[in-house]
Image: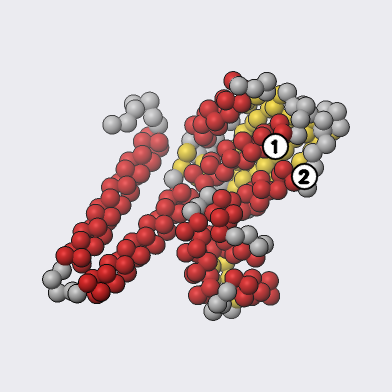
Amino acid sequence: MYSEDASPGTRRLLVDLDRTVADQADRHALELESLLAILRSPRLDDRSARSSAIDTAASALVRLRTEADEQRSSILEPVVGAFARLRNDLRPLERFGSLEIQFVEPPATGRALPSEVAHAARAIVRNTILGLVDGGEVNRVRVQWDCDGLNLLVSIRDDGRGNLTVHDESLRPIAERVSSLDGVLSVDATPGWGSSVDVRLPLDPRSDTKPLASGVLLTVREHDVLRLVTAGERNQAIAAQLGISANTVKFHVSNLLRKVGASTRAELTALALAR
């Protein structure tokens, strides 16, 4: 039962989400029943049953992880609701510290945000503010979100020393997160007056496939994983930056190796750089 105050668009999204969850539950139940049937089958010896069960479980896990990645990018959050969650996330910094945070609300009519963008935007703001505070002499921070129809525009301004640059080490993981979403990060600082960090995150996905070499096409997620593998990142770091599990990263890396005919990450990196 949904709130009568919810907009028709929000109610439709919730109905679609419920349907998707119900479909997944049915598929998972079927897969579990298949596993039980294999393990209980009198026609299979222990070795054959174990092998069949492993194959069935592995296929189910791959499908589950793929669906989770797809849902993360397809579910939408109203921009006002996403901003309200950000305010709740930052409340402890105000309550238990000396930091004053001023929030400038996005327009209520702003376009809904893909879940991946909303999640990333909140993480970017949190990590930026923590970095600014760790830098010292910051008492006040202003956070503003806006939408121009195509992008989420995020602005974070402090009253600190004003010596922040886009190459600051504290901004490196933030810059990588922005880059993974095809966004743009800029920094403007005035000594003695504070620093401003501005981020633009596109709301529309990039094209579904990208070429690596002749006849080899990559999905957007595979392209993101490849970029970070080429940069020397390990699976845990890639997972943290892209907001997916390390097992999902391993799955994508295996697909990349298979697609390009590489046997090691080093060979994969060499082929990518040669492109």
Identified by mark 1, the residue type is Gly
Disc 1 to disc 2, C-alpha distance: 10 Å
Q: Classify mark 2: helix, strand or loop.
A: loop
Task: Name the residue carrying label 2.
Answer: 168
The label number, if any, that marks residue 217 in the structure image: none
Left or right: residue 260 versus residue 248 is: right
Image quarter in which the C terminus is found: bottom right
Give the percent coordinates (x, y) of residue 169.
75, 46
Query: Does residue 269 appear left or right of residue 45 in this picture?
Result: right
> How many C-alpha atoms fall within 10 Å of the one at disc 1: few (<14), some, or many (≥20)?
some
The residue identified by callout 1 is: 131
Residue 151 horizontal/vertical position (percent): 61, 44
Residue 233 image offset from top left, x and y in percent: 63, 59
| Circles 1 and 2: CB atoms closer than 8 Å | yes
Q: Is residue 272 left or right of residue 219?
A: right
| Amino acid carrying mark 2 in the image | Asp
Residue at 71% over, 31% down? 133
Image location (x, y in percent) of residue 21: 32, 47
